[in-house]
Image: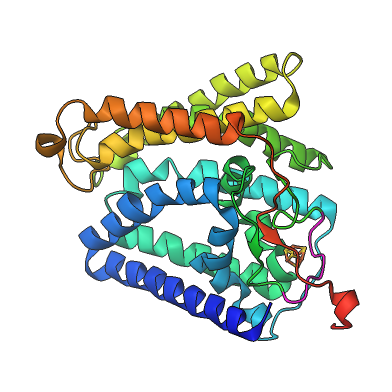
């Protein structure tokens, strides 16, 4: 990559990082704005971005920039991650994802400081992983709880962008999620942890999302008394679609099955999320950015659901397979002679 392109990516990374810090500050000082910016703007846009151009997200994600700052400045121990360890890290990432997301209903959706402290905890963990392990192996392609979702939705990238972090490539993870075409949760079935993590995501995430949307937000101390409900619905949904996925496995080609369940998961997300954003949710005020019910009329949910379901089915199942990876692999360290 030329210096001017590298500077452009650095500027973009800096801008998005500042935006992330701005949201973090707002969560403590102006919680209503911070919560809306995070849960009702950034997070609803993220699955679409991850499905269409996962490499763009991987290049500019503020948590990735935080995790890799010590590597960029030469302060990482740069330990290698074995295939077995990477499997364990991926499984921890899935466990974190399934543990944190239900907390939104009973704490994080309505509590700015609690969400702020959770993000700070994640940032500290990201820095710790970056300080110890080489490039993205510890956090971005390791225990980051968003990474399993990237692998699930990102198998059909529209573009392969330059890698704006790893220079040079130290082959820190094999296979590298960024550099492997059509990566998905079960790419390279090596090791029990990796297979368990990949199978839960491939088969169970659609049900997890469906179950999550059946639970309202509970404010204050009411949250604690609904802890069981907050976890039972998404985990129960996970079990149902996971069983269906395992039952269909002998009859459907693995790639088609994985992509169909990935499409079901992201379509289910927008089935609920888009109407909720504009005031059509069943729990008044929950997940609402702005009430447009009077402007858009009663037809909006049906149109929105038809469009998003058709689009993601086509995007992940109907399109011709591409040979694109999320990012192009930078020059290898051995090739450049760099250490
Ligand atoms: S591009 Fe190379 S250095 Fe970067 S995450 Fe992939 S394997 Fe690791």
Look at the image and give the residue range highlighted in magenta: 167-174
Q: Position of residue 167 (x, y in %)?
A: 73, 76
- For the N terminus, give its image quadrant: bottom right
- For the C terminus, give its image quadrant: bottom right
Left-right relation of 7 to 327: left
Identify the residue at horizontal 48%, vertical 36% (top origin).
266
Which residue is most to the front? 320
Q: Position of residue 155 (x, y in %)?
A: 64, 43
Quarter location, residue 270: top left
How many tags in the picture?
A: 0
Whether residue 114 is situated above or below residue 70 in the rendered picture: above
Q: Is residue 28 visible?
A: yes
Q: Position of residue 287 (x, y in %)?
A: 27, 43
- Camera-side residue of 314 and 339: 314
Q: Is residue 170 magenta?
A: yes
Whether residue 325 is situated above or below residue 23 in the rendered picture: above
- Camera-side residue of 123 and 210: 210
- Camera-side residue of 94 and 310: 310
């Amino acid at each position: 990559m030329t210096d001017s392109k590298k500077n452009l990516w650095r500027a973009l990374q800096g801008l998005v990082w500042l935006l992330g810090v701005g949201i973090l500050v707002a969560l403590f000082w102006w919680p209503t704005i911070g919560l809306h910016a995070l849960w009702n703007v950034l997070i609803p846009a993220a699955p679409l971005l991850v499905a269409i151009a996962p490499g763009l997200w991987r290049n500019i994600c503020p948590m990735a920039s935080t995790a890799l700052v010590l590597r960029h400045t030469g302060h990482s121990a740069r330990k290698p991650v074995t295939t077995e360890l990477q499997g364990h890290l991926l499984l921890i990432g899935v466990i974190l994802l399934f543990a944190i997301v239900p907390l939104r209903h009973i704490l994080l959706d309505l509590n700015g400081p609690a969400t702020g402290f959770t993000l700070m905890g994640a940032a500290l963990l990201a820095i710790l992983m970056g300080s110890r392990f080489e490039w993205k192996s510890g956090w971005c392609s390791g225990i980051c709880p968003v990474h399993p979702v990237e692998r699930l939705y990102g198998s059909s990238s529209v573009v392969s962008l330059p890698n704006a972090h790893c220079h040079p490539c130290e082959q820190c993870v094999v296979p590298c999620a960024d550099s492997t075409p059509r990566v998905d949760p079960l790419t390279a079935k090596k090791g029990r942890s990796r297979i368990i993590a990949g199978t839960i995501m491939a088969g169970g995430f659609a049900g997890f999302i469906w179950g999550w949307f059946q639970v309202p937000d509970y404010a204050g101390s009411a949250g604690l008394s609904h802890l069981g409900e907050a976890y039972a619905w998404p985990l129960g949904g996970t079990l149902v679609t996971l069983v269906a996925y395992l039952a269909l496995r002998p009859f459907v080609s693995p790639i088609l099955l994985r992509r169909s369940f990935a499409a079901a998961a992201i379509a289910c997300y927008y089935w609920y999320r888009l109407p909720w954003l504009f005031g059509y949710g069943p729990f008044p005020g929950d997940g609402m950015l702005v009430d447009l019910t009077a402007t858009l009329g009663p037809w909006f949910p049906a149109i929105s659901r038809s469009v998003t379901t058709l689009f993601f089915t086509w995007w992940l199942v109907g399109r011709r397979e591409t040979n694109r990876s999320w990012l192009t692999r930078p020059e290898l360290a051995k090739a450049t002679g760099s250490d």
